[in-house]
Image (spheres, grey):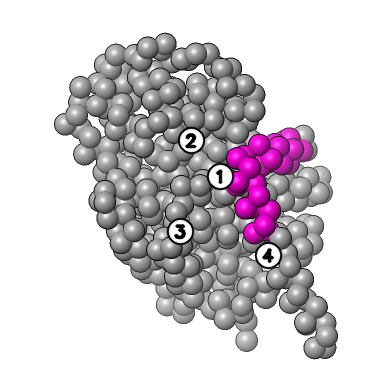
Amino acid sequence: MSSPGLARRLGLADATAIGLGSMIGAGVFAVFAPAAAAAGSGLLIGLVLAAFVAFCNATSSAQLAAVHPVAGGTYAYGRAELGAWWGYLAGWCFVVGKIASCAAMALVFAAYAAPGFERPIAIAAVAALTIINLMGVTRTALATKIIVVISLLALVFVATSGLVAPPADGGLLGGGILAEGWYGILQSAGLLFFAFAGYARIATMGEEVRDPARTIPRAIVLALAGAVIVYGVIAVTALTVLGPDQTAASSAPLADVVAAAGWGWGEPIVRVGAACASLGALLALVAGIGRTSLAMAREDDLPRFLARIHPRTQVPHRTEIAVAIVVIVVIALADLRGAIGFSSFGVLLYYFVANVAALRQSPAVRRYPRWLQGAGAIGCAGLAAMLPWQSVVGGVVVVAIGVAARGVRLVIERRSV
């Protein structure tokens, strides 16, 4: 007997909020400091490059999702357009990279909400948000909308404080926008790409969106455009007020912007906003990983046990519980300060497969020019190679482990026939 399908309960506003909540939480409060360390004020160029690659990926995802409106995102698209191995590579990279992202976002939340108690608070946050997801996808969308509003209000407060704060010595560009060279700029683009990955959550939930052929493409573009505007404003504000060096050295650059304006009383506002943004990212991440894992389990690329959908709430409850357990273990055992680079490597490979799959689609279903998909594939491969070497090596090892595991399974299955 086949498992029932997921319910189509999400409209345009729901899907856009989930994507925007994912991107804002991951980007504004977590990625500007390492990007500034890599490129200084050149991160502004890196932001433009990351946004362009993300746009290419968004159009490929939208084109694919309109034809394949099922759970699983590029895992499903790669299987349909390129073959099982390509789909598996995309799914494996997504699940592993985003599990690291979940742990990172939980720790970011805890660092802002309860400094000194990061690990237990992070574990509690993962458990609480998993329960919300298990209650049903409409509750996930509602919670994300509330979190996005709170986060955006905090960011408006930061941007406003930046207008009255004295500029740093050297101003916005510091020692020059090319001071760290093009390698640093490209590395910052790879790190900043981590912040744009949230729109994938919309595509991975394609089986739960109403009128997916129309809603998914519009939601992806709207969420991405909103995130680009927010990132640009906050990046310029932080670099102008703090300068590249202080931005790179700060563990909470947006709180430092408020302090530089003499608005120290507003630091709790920034902390609440950062905590909410991180929770929004974590909430959508758990949902997205659950849907991709569900699709992989349906094809036996993960244990079939995980393919069950709850008969009442109609969410993939087993996969979401399994994801939460793995994330909690990672939080308890690992130092995840390098998680952004590791996650970016996996996500860039995921979108490389998406671009290649969209490039292979027939003219009858094409919504965007082929050159966008080609540029996206080249951009993903290039940015992945430019990441810090530790992230590249770790990513290659994990991908190799996943490929070997599937190869062994297939050999065992053939011999048992």
SS at mark 2? helix
> Is 273 on the left-hand or right-hand side of 27?
left
Amino acid found under the numbered disc labelled 2: Pro
Q: Earlier in the sequence, mark 1 or mark 3?
A: 3
Closest to the observer, 126 or 33: 33
Overall secondary structure of the magenta section: helix
**Local crowd size for mark 2, using a 10 Å CA cut-off: few (<14), some (14–19), many (≥20):** many
- The dot on residue 341 is 1
Q: Mark 3 points at which residue?
A: 334
Say which residue appears at 26% left-offset and 22% top-offset.
260
SS at mark 3? loop
**Callouts 3 and 2 close, C-beta under 8 Å:** no
Write the start and end of the magenta stretch as one range: 374-399
Say which residue appears at 66% left-offset and 37% top-offset.
386
Mark pair 3, 4: CA separation: 20 Å
Q: Earlier in the sequence, mark 1 or mark 2?
A: 2
Q: Name the residue under label 4.
A: 402
Closest to the observer, 87 or 313: 87
**Local crowd size for mark 4, using a 10 Å CA cut-off: few (<14), some (14–19), many (≥20):** some
Amino acid found under the numbered disc labelled 3: Ala
Mark pair 1, 4: CA separation: 19 Å
**Residue 222 picture location, percent across and down:** 51, 39
**Callouts 1 and 2 close, C-beta under 8 Å:** yes
Residue ranking furthest to the left: 265
Mark pair 1, 3: CA separation: 15 Å
Residue 412 picture quarter: bottom right
Front: mark 1 or 3: 3
Mark pair 3, 2: CA separation: 19 Å
